[in-house]
Image (cartoon, rainbow, N blue to C red):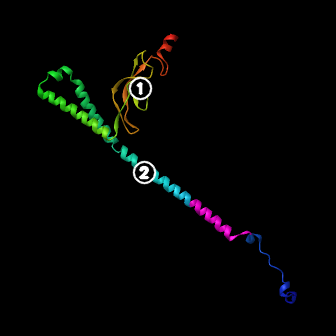
Amino acid sequence: MSDENTSPSEQPEIEMPESFEEIDPIETLRAENSELKDRLLRTVAEMENLRKRTERDVADTRSYAIAGFARDMLSATDALSRALLVLPAEARESSDPTIKSLIEGIEMTEREMQRLLGKHGVKPIEAEGQKFDPHKHQAMFEVPDPTRPEGTVVQVVQTGFAIGERVLRPAMVGVAKGGPRAGESAEAVDKSA
């Protein structure tokens, strides 16, 4: 009953818990806004990365789509080259006109196949005189040659081909053995002997 006798101005003040006083709606909105901006920027960056990756994949697909077909065509081109190598020069010159025409037709076909392969990005791998690179060359044998630096390609058995940066077929090569190391001069080897 004592409560009834107290005047409204004397009523005890209700204290708000500290947790309610510390929450500022503006700060809450700012934090939420900042979080949403961060998520938006991350999403935009992910989408940009996805777009770039997709463009790169499409470009790779375009560039390398013919790799299997080109590999098969290289076999046919090699067969034409071997057919021409079998004929001695004397047989080419002294043969009758029909055989000469056949030989010329095979030569033209081989050149055209090489041109078309090149048009589509299939290029021969330069090997002779280069330092042996296991990514581009396949060593078939070693050649003892003290005049050439060791590890240098001295003979190409079969030309290798690449499409863009990818090797379709490594060059089959013979590699020098016994000469000075790559970068070492022949004089330095002679002085040490």
Q: At 68% across and 71% down in the image, what residue appears?
A: 25
Q: Position of residue 191 (x, y in %)?
A: 51, 11
Q: Position of residue 30 (x, y in %)?
A: 64, 66
> Is 27 included in the stretch rendered in magenta?
yes
Label 1 residue SS: loop
Q: Which mark is residue 73?
A: none
Left-right relation of 77 to 156: left
Left-right relation of 23 to 58: right
Q: Which residue is mark 2?
A: 55
Badges 1 and 2: C-beta atoms under 8 Å apart?
no
Q: Amino acid at mark 2?
A: Glu
In this view of the protein, which residue sits in the foreground, 46 or 188?
A: 188
Label 2 residue SS: helix
Q: Position of residue 36 (x, y in %)?
A: 59, 63
Q: Is residue 85 above or below residue 5?
A: above
Q: At 57% across and 60% down in the image, what residue appears?
A: 39
Q: Quadrant of residue 126?
A: top left
Q: Quadrant of residue 165?
A: top left
Q: Assign the magenta stretch its main secondary structure.
A: helix
Label located before the other in sequence (1 or 2): 2
Q: At 34% across and 35% down in the image, what residue appears?
A: 123
> Is 14 included in the stretch rendered in magenta?
no
Q: Quadrant of residue 93?
A: top left
Distance from the alpha carbon under mark 1 to that under mark 2: 35 Å
Q: Position of residue 186 (x, y in %)?
A: 47, 15
Q: Is residue 176 above or below residue 136?
A: above
Q: Which residue is mark 1?
A: 130
Q: Amino acid at mark 1?
A: Gln
Span highlighted in magenta in the image: 22-39
